[in-house]
Amino acid sequence: MDYKLELVIVPVSDVDRAKAFYAEKAGFTVDHDHTVNENLRFVQLTPPGSPCSIAIGKGVTDAEPGTAAGCQLVVRDIDAARAELAGRGVEVSEVQRGPGGAFVFFTDPDGNRWSLQDTSG
């Protein structure tokens, strides 16, 4: 039996602001933006090259905005990924290299925490 992680909910306070951040600054593709009614709006975004998407919206989670931690994107070139994000206006950390690899960190406007890990070894 395969168990494929395909969607992660990211709690946000302002859907339009978060959508703009993830699409325009982080470079995610907007897959869906559907308002069901005044209490339910579902926006799905996918990082470039990822089989897993995120969902933000109104009425999609009871979690407090900014409480997502540990979302990790894996890249082949950490320096290029950092430069791309910084060039789009994301406040991104310096590259941190250590025995576990190379990492870069950033947060969305609500404080949801993301990391990038370099796979080039």
Image: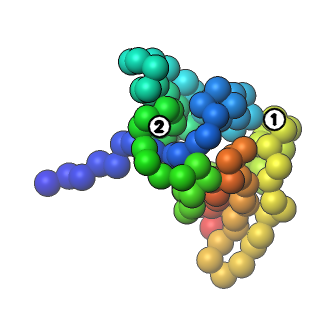
Residue 27 visible in rendering:
no
Q: Quadrant of the N terminus?
A: bottom left
Q: Where is residue 90 in the image (x, y as percent from the top left)?
A: 80, 43
Q: Is any atom of residue 65 visible in this view?
A: yes
Question: Residue drawn at (57%, 27%), measured in percent from left and top?
Answer: 29
**Measured along the vertical axis of the image, is residue 93 above or below residue 10?**
below
On screen, residue 62 versus residue 19, left or right, reads: left
Residue drawn at (79%, 63%), measured in percent from left and top? 95
120 versus 89 height, above or below: below
Precedes in sequence: disc 1 or disc 2: 2
Give how far across and how far down residue 23 sits, in percent: 65, 29
Mark 1 or 2, closer to the camera? 2
Q: Which residue lies furthest to the front in this view?
A: 38
Q: Residues within 10 Å of mark 1 (few under 14, many from 20)?
A: some
Q: Is 82 or 19 nearer to us in this picture?
A: 19
Identify the element where label 1 is drawn. Answer: loop
**Horizontal side, residue 91 vs residue 66: left or right:** right
Residue 103 appears at what percent x and percent y?
69, 64
Report the residue marked by disc 1.
88
Q: Which is nearer the eye, 119 or 29?
A: 29
Asked if the residue under mark 2 is in contact with the one under mark 1, i.e. CB atoms within 8 Å, the reply is no
Three-letter residue code for mark 2: Ala
> Could you say whether the residue bearing mark 2 is in a helix, strand or loop?
strand
Name which residue type carries label 1: Arg
Left or right of 22, for residue 53 = left
Q: Name the residue under label 2.
A: 55
Tell me which residue sits at (53%, 46%) in the image: 11
Residue extending farthest to the left is 1
